[in-house]
Image (cartoon, grey):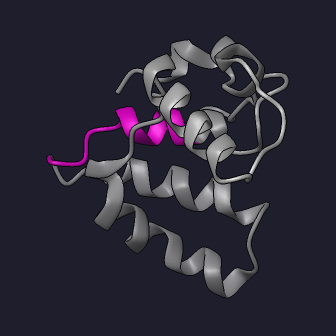
Amino acid sequence: MPEEQQTPGAPPGTSQQAEAKQAPDATGDDRDLRLATQAARNVFPAHETGLIADIVARDLPYYDATISAETFNRMHAFALDMGLVTQPASYEQVVATQFRHLWTG
């Protein structure tokens, strides 16, 4: 497997998460699980890292990094109404749109 490279400015593990989402899981190929475990090593303690593969295997069909402008606007309006945030913000200020190319799944 080639050495993983982090996309500059991306949160740790973002590249691995995108690759894991694109890796075939229905075929029994477990490379998606190895990528998830590899990404977790730098973030979680050893015990929790050992659990990541099973969690990803269970949840992989539900992962979707896409956040539409409409979804953001509704969530942000709710957060403003509830006082969870006090300043309006735009979609581009909050969502890492420069990584949109990683959102495909």
Residue at horizontal 56 percent and vertical 15 percent from the top: 100
Q: Determine whether 40 is above or below 49 in the image.
A: above
Q: Is 25 colored magenta in this rendering?
A: yes
In this rendering, position of residue 70 left or right of residue 39: left
- Depth order, front residue of 92/20: 92
Locate the N terminus by quadrant. Answer: top right
- Depth order, front residue of 30/76: 76
Residue at the extreme front of the image, as rendered = 81
Q: Position of residue 67 (x, y in %)?
A: 48, 28
Q: Determine whether 83 is above or below 23 in the image.
A: below
Residue at horizontal 45 percent and vertical 29 percent from the top: 71
Q: Which residues are magenta?
A: 17-26
Q: Determine whether 11 is above or below 89 in the image.
A: below
Q: Position of residue 26 (x, y in %)?
A: 15, 48
Number of labelled discs? 0
Residue at horizontal 77 percent and vertical 39 percent from the top: 11
Residue at the extreme left of the image, as rendered = 27
